[in-house]
Image (cartoon, rainbow, N blue to C red):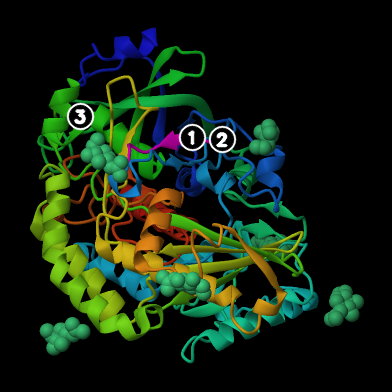
Amino acid sequence: MKATTLLGLLPLVRPSLGREEAADYIIVGAGTAGLVLANRLSEDPSVTVTVIEPGADERNNINVTGTDKFSLAFNTHIDWQYSTVNQPRANNRSLPLHQGKAWGGTSTINGMTYIRGNKLEFDLWSHLGNPGWTWSTLLPYFIKSENYTLPTPSQLDAGATYQPQNHGFSGPLHVGYPAALHNGSFAPLILGAWDDMSASLAHNADLNSGDVHGFGMGPQTLDGREDVRYDSARAYYHPVEHRGNLRIVRGTVRRILWGDGGGKGGRELLRANGVEFVTDQGAVQRMRVGKEVIVSAGGVRSPLVLEASGIGNRRILESLGIETLVDLPGVGENLGGQSAHIIVFSGEMEASASAYHTHVTAAELFGANLESVRNATRESIPRWAKDMARGSRNALSPEALEKQFRLQYDLIFKHNVTPAEVITVSAPGGIMVSNYYAILPFSRGSVHLGGLDQIDKPVIDPGVFSADFDIAATTAIGRMAQRFWLSDHIRPLVTAQLVPDASALPENATDAQWLAHLRQSLDMAAHPRGSAAMMSRELGGVVDPELRVYGTANVRVVDASVIPMPISGHMSAAVYAVAEKAADIIKQNSKGQ
Ligand SMILES: *[C@@H]1O[C@H](CO)[C@@H](O)[C@H](O)[C@H]1NC(C)=O
Ligand SMILES: *[C@@H]1O[C@H](CO)[C@@H](O)[C@H](O)[C@H]1NC(C)=O
Ligand SMILES: *[C@@H]1O[C@H](CO)[C@@H](O)[C@H](O)[C@H]1NC(C)=O
Ligand SMILES: *[C@@H]1O[C@H](CO)[C@@H](O)[C@H](O)[C@H]1NC(C)=O
Ligand SMILES: *[C@@H]1O[C@H](CO)[C@@H](O)[C@H](O)[C@H]1NC(C)=O
Ligand SMILES: *[C@@H]1O[C@H](CO)[C@@H](O)[C@H](O)[C@H]1NC(C)=O
């Protein structure tokens, strides 16, 4: 604590750092993205790469390695165990937000789902000031990162399907199905029931083709033959940890240190000359950087590192006593999250080792109400934009939010991109579970530094249910999940609705009952993104299309915080691809210098 209080007194601009240790590239955070960069940048033996990470090497932690251990790591030492500020639209509850604290970051504790998302969701990025960012420019990087393991005959029997042209077979990241997945009665039953749910809803032969519509068994980031989770440490770091030019240093980066200008674009661009970090023993140390600082601390922490370094909203920085070097009001804003919901039944069903993922269009979701929801959404966009701009205390403009929302509206209502997902799975003892989500929410929130020495206690406000669409979509997908288990196919196997109790949420529950239930039970999915968005500055962006922080010469952000808009995919697949592409951009830039 003493050390961090001291930090507040040190000037941000330090022209010379003297004789501290140095690296060409300093990567802030050994998370999902950070270790992709560590691996790719250190391929060049002439550069040195140092990753600074507060978490530890957890390669032997059973909660990490076990492919059937999802959620056991929550609230253990490898979970940051963040919580949000009280959410007024969730009965004023503070919601837990799990983020991994380990080599491998959140990829060590996530559900391992490997689903990329819809083409058009990625194409949208190019409409936000990011030429060169589309599905077709990211696909080679999805493929580069992946080593897909073909399902065994028994796994094919059990519901695994794929199209080889969508996959990579020589990348570091194993993707496939767990060893425990083998033939049985779950797949045919679930397939038949989903098939009957809607005339337009069909089996999806490969959820990773750029079209997630329909239902299919979700592949995961694991090696089914060794039966071990593949997090980014196992995939990208262990194989290259012997490289003499690469290392991980245990510590928490508190701020970037700046030289006195002299960037490529002239004196007005800030140039980082090092970072200051606190070791796990509490000592304050500095490290010089030769080329670049790359902030990969994740959707929660990356904006905090920028703020602590004098980059952010002047009003917020002033209130914290931090000198503003780049007034960039988008830092920490645009935070997107997804709320997570569950419904559980008991009965007679075989346990399944893998889950079905069903992604539905607005037409399937809203049925006869489609037109009224569409109209209400279109008419509400200006109000949501105004409310959320006010919520950001005008860090974002209503015009900027309105532009994002109109693009998102078009995806959902004109281009039939899927705004909701149900995950269907069964556990031992006849427990049948649906997790359901509005995956393209309009709500945006923020994450900021709460104080100078409080980088580990961020002020996170996801703004849950700020837009009515999110409530309508969550209610509709919840109803679909409930209807699924009570459909003709499955109902004979069901004995009771366990969670929530059927009296709290009966089959014919009204909108008001649903809303009351959602508010008191919703959780956060661990998918924070957008808090250092890759967008034009006018729209509230923080990094340019080369992921460089506006106003700086040699600082980038590479992780989920740059992903500017919600995606139907699960976050990690996209983070791997973004980081792979970023590594190529950085290498190209470095050649040009
Ligand atoms: C694994 O998870 C369990 C349940 O949360 C916990 O009790 C245990 O300490 C964890 N093991 C490790 C090595 O963290
Ligand atoms: C939530 O807190 C606010 C402010 O403290 C209060 O006005 C509101 O009534 C509370 N809402 C609920 C549902 O408790
Ligand atoms: C299930 O798989 C096992 C082993 O692969 C095989 O021996 C068995 O015949 C299969 N059963 C069915 C019903 O397909
Ligand atoms: C990909 O994974 C398979 C096992 O599923 C392994 O045999 C192969 O060596 C891997 N390929 C690469 C390039 O790592
Ligand atoms: C939706 O809006 C259109 C165009 O404004 C209007 O013609 C239509 O009646 C509205 N439908 C509903 C159900 O509100
Ligand atoms: C729901 O159904 C139950 C029993 O079938 C009935 O008692 C109840 O009034 C219904 N509730 C609504 C809101 O329709």
Q: Is mark 2 within 8 Å of ligand 1?
A: yes
Q: Earlier in the sequence, mark 2 or mark 3?
A: 2
Q: Nearer the viewer, residue 147 or 459?
A: 459
| Residue carrying label 1 | 81
Determine crowd level at label 2: few under 14, some 14-19, many 20+ residues with C-alpha closer than 10 A: some
Across and down, in percent, residue 226 comes to 77, 55
Residue 80 part of the magenta-drawn span: yes
The three-letter code of the residue at mark 2 reads Asn
Q: CA distance from mark 1 to mark 3?
A: 26 Å
The three-letter code of the residue at mark 3 reads Gly
Tell me: residue 212, above or below residue 448.
below
Name the quadrant of the N terminus: top left
In terms of secondary structure, what is the magenta stretch mainly?
loop
SS class of the residue under badge 3?
Answer: loop
| Residue carrying label 2 | 75
Q: Magenta residues? A: 79-86
Tell us which disc is closer to us: 2 or 3: 2
Determine crowd level at label 1: few under 14, some 14-19, many 20+ residues with C-alpha closer than 10 A: some
| Residue carrying label 3 | 310
Tell me: residue 433, above or below residue 86.
below
| Displayed quadrant of residue 410 | bottom left
